[in-house]
Image: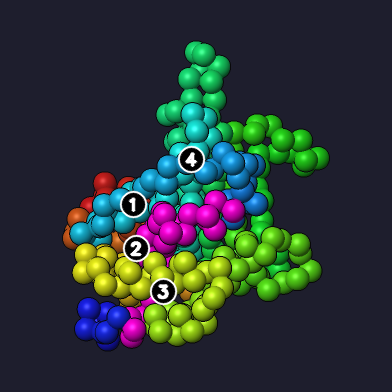
Amino acid sequence: MNNQENSIEDFVFDPMNDAAFKSLIRAEETRDIVIGVLSDITPVLENELKNALFLGGEVPKEILKEKGMVSDVLVRVNDKNRIIIEANRQYSKILFDKNASYAFKYIYMESNVGKSEYHPVSLVSVDKENVFHTDKPILVFQIQDEEGHIETELYYSVHLVLENFQNLAYTISDRVRIFMEFFQNQPDTIANLKEKYKDGEMMAFVNKAEELSKDTRFINYYNIEEMHEAEKQDFYHTGVEAGKLEGQTEEKLEIAKKMLEAEEPVEKISVYTNLTLEEISNLKESS
């Protein structure tokens, strides 16, 4: 059922929906929890985050062509530190390359080499899929050699592997664990979320979700993102899903050609077909 036809209590809310994720992370009402989580998983201190600006994704996407052009949430901590937060609902071959490119972009654009001023960026990925096939709830990546020597502190990447939030073999803070548990939720009604989290810390997120479900503009944005996910699933069901693509190059190319004819952006085509940007560019030139 279209969410525009539902009552507020029956609104089916997926916290990993792009519109929902951005709105929840950037909300003043949830700020204390988000700040606590970020201070626990990045090198940035909690007191530095209290006056941070949470930016990015401010304008709802009215068309799907705008998908994949900007980072989900940018946290401007102070004159130097930046945190990029990305919700990874589904995996694609270029996903982590794309996210890392945002981080390097900010490092390059905001550093001043002449004055030896360099701005570190932490990239936080909230992963719905366990792409690395790990049992760890948190993975940290830095640029280092095989002996663990870190070449630069400018880039720090952390993945929250949502499905592993209950693994007590690894020590993580309670606020990180409950944060991960909330975003690991399957889509559910506002009424069920209120019952599940009543009197708990994550009730601030549920209250914000309820507020958003009353906003027609948000609902339109939310439904556009659901359409985007449905489009990807349609492509996957025709044999485009990564893992089913071996030996099916022709099918991928045919789908890419049709999307190029429809003037879809190459980033979107890559997400749907798992072709690289270079492969799509070559296809476009030969068409």
Compare marks 1 and 4 and give the one earlier in the sequence. Answer: 4
How many numbered marks appear?
4
Mark closer to the observer (1, 4): 4
Q: Which element type, helix, strand or loop, lies under badge 2?
A: helix
Amino acid at dot 4: Asn
Compare marks 1 and 3 and give the one earlier in the sequence. Answer: 3
Compare marks 3 and 4 and give the one earlier in the sequence. Answer: 3
In front: 273, or 90? Answer: 90
Q: Circle 2: is it few (<14), some (14-19), or many (20+) Cα within 10 Å?
A: many
Q: Position of residue 49 (x, y in %)?
A: 54, 43
Q: Please, what is the dominant secondary structure of the magenta stretch?
A: helix
Instruction: Tell me the residue that label 3 is attached to.
Output: 14
In front: 84, or 197? Answer: 197
Q: Which element type, helix, strand or loop, lies under badge 4?
A: loop
In front: 13, or 237? Answer: 13
Compare marks 3 and 2 and give the one earlier in the sequence. Answer: 3
Residue at (32%, 68%) from the top-left corner? 212
Q: Circle 4: is it few (<14), some (14-19), or many (20+) Cα within 10 Å?
A: few
- Taking 204 as reference, is 68 left or right? left
Magenta-drawn segment: 9-36
Which mark, residue 57?
1
Which mark, residue 19?
2
Q: CA distance from mark 3 to mark 4?
A: 29 Å
Compare marks 2 and 4 and give the one earlier in the sequence. Answer: 2
Q: Position of residue 252 (x, y in %)?
A: 36, 66
Amino acid at dot 2: Ala
Residue 223 appears anywhere in the view: no
Amino acid at dot 1: Gly
Which mark, residue 51?
4
